[in-house]
Amino acid sequence: MNNYIEFVLVGEETEAPNILEKITEKWKVEPTIFTALEKEEEYNVVRIEKSKNILKVLIYSQEVVYNLEIKEKTYSNYKKIVIVIKSKKNKGEYDKFLEKLKVDTMNLIMSEWKNSRCYWLVDNQSEELSQNIYIEINKLENRLRSFINIAMIDMLGVEWWETVSVAKFGKKYYSEKVHERKSREYKDKFSRFKNIQDELLTLNSDDLSELMAIKISEWDYSEENWKKLEEKIKSKEIGEIISIYESQKK
């Protein structure tokens, strides 16, 4: 499968006069318009063809040919410019030149069309990269879930979620009833999962990291600590009671 990228810029037609002409002139006068390209990456703008509403640019780099096509479409009160980039896919390699080519092309057009908006439609190279990264993130999240479950059960018992995480994630997962509702709906459909604790499945890597960083404190009971605290309780000095209590926690 070859690499294929497509994105579109849209905006007011009156604010985008002669976009294709301006781009063509820039490439002819300054073929190194791709300012983000690294110096060691050799490339050549081989051919530029322009018709009324379409601009075709053929670029050659590292024995790979890149076909860049820019189409201009005008509607009643706005203009749309569609950019398509095609190139041969090198198996197992991420094409850095292609990445820079698409970004520089976008920046070039937007530099001439200040108020345009860019919408990304297709980018199979980035999509493939995202899929590979997601697999690794998913593996990591599952390992974190396993570690948290084992550690919390051993330290706090079977009801660790209720005693610890409600305070941390209560507003996010309970006050809004999002997790509770989704969990109930799912378990109603699949009764064999009725007793499965699924709380951690709703947490992403950021939430899991926060959960792992929770510090649990308790009052360090001793006769000495109790006497100090009792004195403040008898004096009814609320601020000092809290201060003493906090200093005695471990």
Image (cartoon, rainbow, N blue to C red):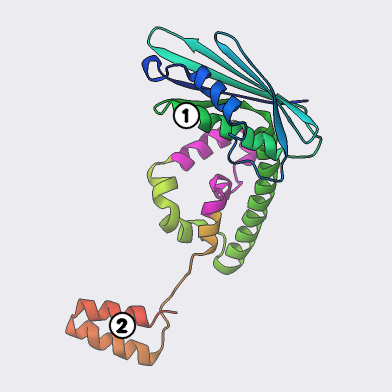
Q: Position of residue 198 (x, y in %)?
A: 58, 46
Identity, as a three-letter code, of the amino acid under mark 2: Ile
* Pointer 1 residue: 110
Outermost front residue: 29
Q: In this figure, which residue is indicated by the disc labeled 2?
A: 244
Q: Residue at x 54, y 48 (%)?
A: 203
Whole-percent x and y of residue 220? 43, 82
Q: In which image quadrant can residue 248 be found?
A: bottom left
Residue closer to the observer: 177 or 57: 57
Q: Which residues are magenta?
A: 178-207
241 to 195, vertically: above or below: below
Residue 109 or 197: which is nearer the viewer? 109
How many circles with numbers are drawn on the protein? Answer: 2
Q: Is residue 182 above or below residue 73?
A: below
Residue 101 location, quadrant: top right
Q: Residue at x 41, y 88 (%)?
A: 222
Helix, strand or loop under label 1: helix
Task: Indicate the amino acid at tag 1.
Answer: Met
- If the image is split into quadrants, where does the C terminus sit? bottom left
